[in-house]
Amino acid sequence: MPKTWRAAHEELARDLSRLVEARVLGPVDVLFGLDKGLRRRAFEAVLVWTEELLGPDDDTARMTAIRLISTLFPSDQPFDPPSDWWTTPFGRAVLLRAGHPNAEVVSFTVAAAMLGITRQGVHDLARRGKVQAHPDGGVTVDSVQARLKERLLSDSETSGGSAGSSGSSGSSGSSGSSETS
């Protein structure tokens, strides 16, 4: 069952709040202590980021996604999250709005996580031309992103428009399901 647009916003805001608490506010609190004003500002910022990530402006959404990834997941190495990260509300929003920040091609396992289906389901989609297989293995991120957007749009239309199509965090789905359309 597709999510409502409001539920997608709430789910993404909760996920971003959890990340900001764990990766920013918690460490600052341990080192310096926090006042309520900073927590309130962080909460307000999460609401703004949620609107930007799920809003109509693709450039703003993409820049917000990249800015949040570089700040919340700092590293000297390229951003390469574990497969299950893509099933989180933030991971799904990043995929929809920015693709994979550092890869043009992903493994069938990562694509399966991105789409919320099985690896075999991705192989089936590639065989039927629904996602683009790469000659060196895996599938293109652009085709996975397009497939997810198409699926969300289809879910939105069949539910009478209650699910967002441009940037909804979508259903994280069961990785045991197989897509047939």
Image (cartoon, rainbow, N blue to C red):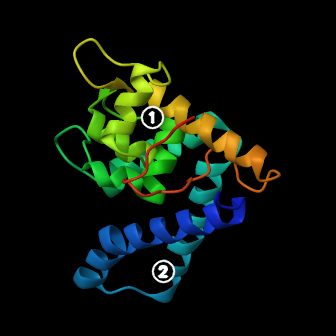
The residue tagged with tag 2: helix, strand or loop?
A: helix
For residue 102, say whether it is visible. Answer: yes
Residue, disc 1: 99
Q: How many marks?
A: 2
Task: Name the spot of residue 17 as percent of width and height, x first.
Answer: 47, 71
Q: Residue at x 62, y 51 (%)?
A: 168
Seen in the picture, residue 108 relative to 53 is either above or below; the reply is above
For residue 104, say whether it is visible. Answer: no
Q: Which of pointers 1 and 2 lies earlier in the amino acid sequence?
A: 2
Task: Name the spot of residue 85 as percent of width and height, x first.
Answer: 33, 54
User: How many C-alpha atoms fall within 10 Å of the one at disc 1: few (<14), some, or many (≥20)?
Assistant: many
Dot 1 amino acid type: Gly
Seen in the picture, residue 124 relative to 175 is either above or below; the reply is above
User: Quadrant location of residue 107?
Assistant: top left
Q: Which mark is residue 157?
A: none
Task: Name the spot of residue 181 as percent of width and height, x first.
Answer: 57, 34
The residue tagged with tag 1: helix, strand or loop?
A: loop
Residue, disc 2: 39
Q: Contact, CB < 8 Å: mark 1 with mark 2?
A: no
Q: Residue at x 45, y 24 (%)?
A: 131
Left/right of residue 38 with respect to residue 3 in the rendered view: left
Q: Residue at x 46, y 55 (%)?
A: 90
Quarter of the image that includes the N terminus: bottom right
Foreground residue among 173 and 180: 180
Seen in the picture, residue 84 relative to 12 is either above or below; the reply is above
Left/right of residue 126 with respect to residue 53 in the rendered view: left
